[in-house]
Image (cartoon, rainbow, N blue to C red):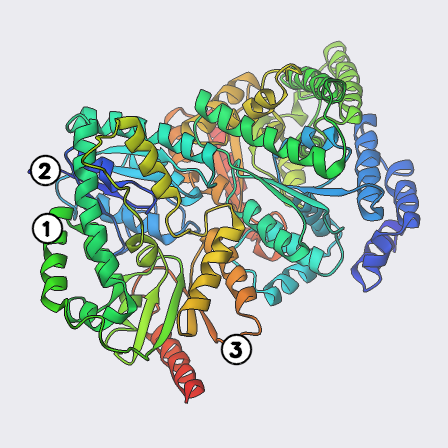
Amino acid sequence: MSIKAQFNERLKNELGRKLLSSPVTYRLAREIFVRKGNFAFEAKKKMTAMALEQAAEAYQKKRPVAWTSAFFPTEMLYFFDLIPFAPEVAAGTSAALELSPRLIRHAESMGLSADSCSFHRCAAAGTDLDYFPHPDFLMASAHLCDGAPHLFQYMARRSRKPLYLLDVPAGDDDRALHYVADQLAEIASDLEKKRGIKLTDDRIAAVFEASNRARHFRIEVENLRTEVPAPLNGTEGLAYIYLTLLGQGHPETAAIYETLTGELKEVVKKNRVETVKMDHERYRLIWLHLRPYYSSDLISYLENELKMVIAAEEMNLVHWPPLDPEKPFISLARRVILHPGLGPIERRLKFIIKNYHRYRAHGVIHFSHWGCRQSVGSILFLKKELQKRNIPFLAVDGDCIDGTSFPWGQVLTRIDSFYEIMEELYA
Amino acid sequence: MRNKSNKKVGWLCTYTPEEIIHAAGFTPVRLLPGSGAFTEGSEDLLPPNICPYPRRILSTLRSGILQNMEGVVVANSCNAMLHLYNVLRTAGDFFVYLLDVPRKLNDQAVDYFTGELIRLADYLGGRGQPVTAETLASSLSLYRERAKYLQKLTDLQCYDLLLSAFPSGYHELAVEASGLSPEIFTAKLKRLVEKYSSGCRTQQDNRSLILFAGGLISDSLSRMLDGRRELIVYPENCSGMRYLLKKTPFVNPDRPATAGELYRAISRACLEKPPCPRIFNTSTREKYFRNLLDTMPVKGVIYHDLIFCDLCHYDYLLLQDLLAGTGIPLLKVKTELGEEDSGQLQTRVEAFLEIVSQEEQ
């Protein structure tokens, strides 16, 4: 058994909780996953180190820990020196570490419905079993999902810790903007009191500078990824969602994207100089939603076997203008309400079509996570609309966390059929 | 004012202000999964792992069962409703309007919702009649009159009176109230209440009460508790009390309000209605449940966990926590709002009621 496998195995047993909060674990993890890890890109190595550092801080409670749901503006946490912890990300990690089956079983015993999102079931169970660090603050947004804010309410009730909920309307007009901005201002005002930290202009400027710098390099990365062949595939690209969820406003995020920009420039240069072998990129895809976090051949089969390369992922794309430190809450609110997945489906459709063309893609794949009402609800509508525009579309039904709800055999057949459609269309 | 028009506008969520639809010259009709509700005909637009309420409404509307439907106001109350809005626009020859509803209850939320109500009134006014301060005040008066009689009928002491006209109890009352024009329904209530006004409050009622909580229920689920006069069945859900106890703002005839004031009053009344699990102020829902448990003779709770409804799933956990240690039995039932599981459900509900009655003895 490899050291990595042994490490995973130990986490699964009863000592797992103690292991997670021990500084030794993180020294070991850095050794196994970072120093001796096999990374195609330095940027990913840096990101892994950052994730481990954030996890270590959260488990060791060096400062108060704030739980955040996906897309809550994390700049708000960095304003107040809070350690971010995303239980949804932790649920993904638990699947990768093969802890999730145990957590899912435990969630059922807590009364959580098997119909609800497995990310959230794992988050609740992981905390109940002390696998995850307990929150000092909880911050959730109604951006896209009904489940997360209600999970956070449930966890806040159990932990008796302050909860901040961001109510996000479906509209994107001025009224919606101010409604969200006012809530953010109110949260900041309360955190000033609770943390004893004054939100000065300097603090805002520092966090926004990091956020805007990361945004700048993200856009550079996006532009580089429009190149054919793709300098970064989906196997790599999907990992950077971590930074969208936990890294906005953190200086290391900007550094990671800067490193990635430099690395991708090199790849593009090399691809241009050398004779480009297009046989490793037969078709280009836009990837919608997330991916399975347990061991799965899905992405590898698409990219390595069928040479259908993921050129861009919906969740990684920048959709907001730079943040203005003069108007901090309006700026953050604007990013929130401009999310393409928010409101009527036309916004998401338009975003997909725009990026389909931008990335010179041949098709679109949607990973339909069973418990996600937001992403799955309009899947049939999206399919019709994309097909009307002759854009091949495949919805892969599965679950990001629960491997037992991923019918690989059926998925394989559907992917093969999708490939055949591409062959007929483009060969 | 009486709406002479037969033009109907459908609505789904109880945060929708019927008064504004009415003031625009339409008869507001709530779209509910009735007895014959089915999901066939929705598979090509909504996936199976979405709440059955929108799926059934989509099927019903596409089947053409509902005639004279000018349009539908879909409140953005949850993910499922937003998806219904997305696909309903392709489903028939009627307009579909998305009404954004805040999840919070504070001054900013009231302001935001007031703006949304003005937009709704402009939109509906363009399709029916213009909504003015006068038409709005007139509609509010009608709904306030209706609310007055509903309040009388929702008094637990009047349960027999209620059953004499609505054998399925509060659920039937809510279904009828939300499906008929306020003029017709208020007249019916008025006759009923006046007929019994002397006897309604005099009887001491010692019956046990079953709290029926959670997601909205279908007629078939409601029927399972029909005919049990030894019990009071209290549906706190949105096809029950959360609709029936919604307040209507007072209109002072001596000081005519501006349209802006009226919209704001409606906005506040809607957001302050008995809270739905979607509301973010978690303590609001908790206080509401605590109040029900403290002030009523609750002997058992049946929770309807609507399949694929995240709001219900987490609301159930709240109630489960609140009931822990109280000795009040809790039964969770899960349905797809149809007849499919009624046999098995009936057995479970009957067994539960038997346990409740045994515990009481």
- State the image quarter where residue B270 is shown: top left
Q: Is residue B223 left or right of residue A351?
A: left
Q: What is the crowding at mark 2: few (fewer than 14 residues within 10 Å), some, or many (at least 20)?
A: few
Look at 57% across and 55% down and name the residue there. Answer: A405
Q: Chain of mark 1?
A: B
Q: Are marks 1 and 2 in contact (CB under 8 Å)?
A: no
Amino acid type, mark 1: Ile
Name the one closer to the observer, B68 or A195. A195
Q: Is residue B33 left or right of residue A251?
A: left
List the residue tagged with mark 1.
Answer: B184
* SS for callout 2: loop
Q: Residue furthest top?
A: A273
Look at 22% across and 62% down and name the residue there. Answer: B153
Disc sitting over residue B327 in the figure: 3
Q: What is the crowding at mark 1: few (fewer than 14 residues within 10 Å), some, or many (at least 20)?
A: few
Q: Is residue B358 left or right of residue A278?
A: left
Disc sitting over residue B1 in the figure: 2
Q: Residue furthest bottom?
A: B361
